[in-house]
Image (cartoon, rainbow, N blue to C red):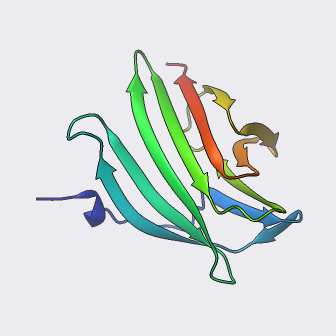
Amino acid sequence: TATLADVTLFGDYRAWSVQDGGNPVTVKVDWRGYRLIDHTGGIVIRYDMVLPDGARIGVEEQPEAMTGVKLQRKFTITGIPVSSRLSLELNGTGYQAQHTASGATLRTEGGATFLDFTASGEATLETTWTP
């Protein structure tokens, strides 16, 4: 039986990035597993961004498929240092998408769209693809 722990990704693409005081910081993504919500109510994916000094920014993500070609992702972020910004690049599927966010900021830079977190807390991202 395969589990999410058996998934291996290859390549050097980094969807998550961290900046401190506007300067890029090298982070390591540490997979912390997942948990099921009430056996069939969904899944929460858990991982940390490990900073060079060993501090951790915790990420819990709860994805949910919505009606149509829409995905809702709920994030709980913990441990963001005061002067830091945690960013998730949202492009990469090759398809046109519309994003709406609450609790975090959408930013476009260099043709890419990012979801930016500047403080610990909860945020929701909804993405709708154009077929």
Res 63 quadrant in image: top left
State the residue in front, 75 or 110: 75
State the residue in front, 86 or 36: 36
* Residue positioned 22% across, 58% down in the render: 3
Q: Position of residue 64 (x, y in %)?
A: 40, 32
Question: Most extreme residue toward the left, as rendered?
Answer: 1
Q: Position of residue 102 (x, y in %)?
A: 67, 30
Q: Is residue 89 visible?
A: no
State the residue in front, 130 or 114: 114
State left or right for residue 24 relative to residue 92: right
Q: Position of residue 33 (x, y in %)?
A: 35, 62
Q: Does 106 sit above or below residue 16?
A: above
Res 62 quadrant in image: top left
Q: Position of residue 78 (x, y in %)?
A: 61, 58
Res 15 quadrant in image: bottom right
Q: Does 122 sit above or below residue 56?
A: above
Question: Most extreme residue toward the bottom, as rendered?
Answer: 53
Q: Is residue 86 visible?
A: yes
* Residue positioned 56% across, 37% down in the render: 94
Q: Does 46 sit above or below residue 124?
A: below
* Residue positioned 69% across, 84% down in the render: 53
Q: Does 24 sit above or below residue 125?
A: below
* Residue positioned 76% across, 51% down in the render: 118
